[in-house]
Image (cartoon, rainbow, N blue to C red):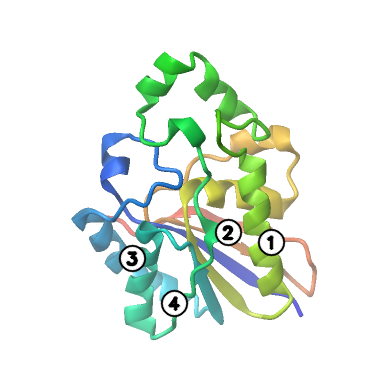
Amino acid sequence: MTLDRLVLWRHGDTDFNAAGRIQGHLDTALTETGREQAERAAPVIASFEPQVAVGSDLRRAAATAMAFTELSGMAVPQDKRLRETHLGEWQGLSGAEVEHGWPGAMGTWRADPTWAPPGGESRVEVAERGFEVVSELDATYSATALVCAHGGLITGLTARLLGWPHELWPGLGGVANCHWVVLSRRGGSRQWRLITYNGGVPG
């Protein structure tokens, strides 16, 4: 038994997003804008008719998933393996503050998915824990699965599912707040194909 479609949905806007601060595992909440984004996106997410859904246990993802639950009636169990990348000593800082404290390190992190910030984890590591969740869904379900999570996890997980070598991972751009990625399979193949990247609702 294998999934034939996977929808990866990023959470809505938070105060840290608006201020350009690094969240990682910090448990920030949605802004009013973020809640509105989730409500606008939820009908499109529901139209994928997921057979199963699972989400990060951090509040910003859980509140986004709740917009889908309220519309569809489907519960979204939480799994801490779907948390955002742990960014160690950088969490809570702005990009300028990181550059001041660790000159050039932000560029290294963006260019090398195997490199981790001090006290944190690499993008390869976060992708692997997300991959564990998808693999478990893959062994149990055969239609569409929804994952509500975070930008860093979604980007890394997408590259991992597509089987890209690490040097190509930086070529994937970011996923905007409350936007999504769709991957699918055809004809019983286990190979994922990228159908939509950074899809969203205008407005």
Say which label, 3 or 2, has the lower sequence index.
3
- Real-space CA distance between mark 1 and mark 4, rounded to the nearest whole angstrom: 26 Å
Give the amino acid type for the residue marked by disc 1 in the picture.
Answer: Glu
- Real-space CA distance between mark 1 and mark 2, rounded to the nearest whole angstrom: 8 Å
For the residues labelled 3 and 1, say whether their Cβ atoms are less than 8 Å apart: no
Left or right, residue 113 beside residue 48: right
Q: In this figure, which residue is indicated by the disc labeled 4?
A: 47
Say which label, 4 or 2, has the lower sequence index.
4
> Quick one: SS at disc 2?
helix
Give the amino acid type for the residue marked by disc 3 in the picture.
Answer: Ala
Give the amino acid type for the residue marked by disc 2 in the picture.
Answer: Arg
Residue 81 badge: 2
For the residues labelled 1 and 2, say whether their Cβ atoms are less than 8 Å apart: yes
Q: Which label lies toward us, 1 or 4? A: 1
Q: Residue 201 appears in which quarter of the rendering?
A: bottom left
Q: In this figure, which residue is indicated by the disc labeled 3?
A: 63
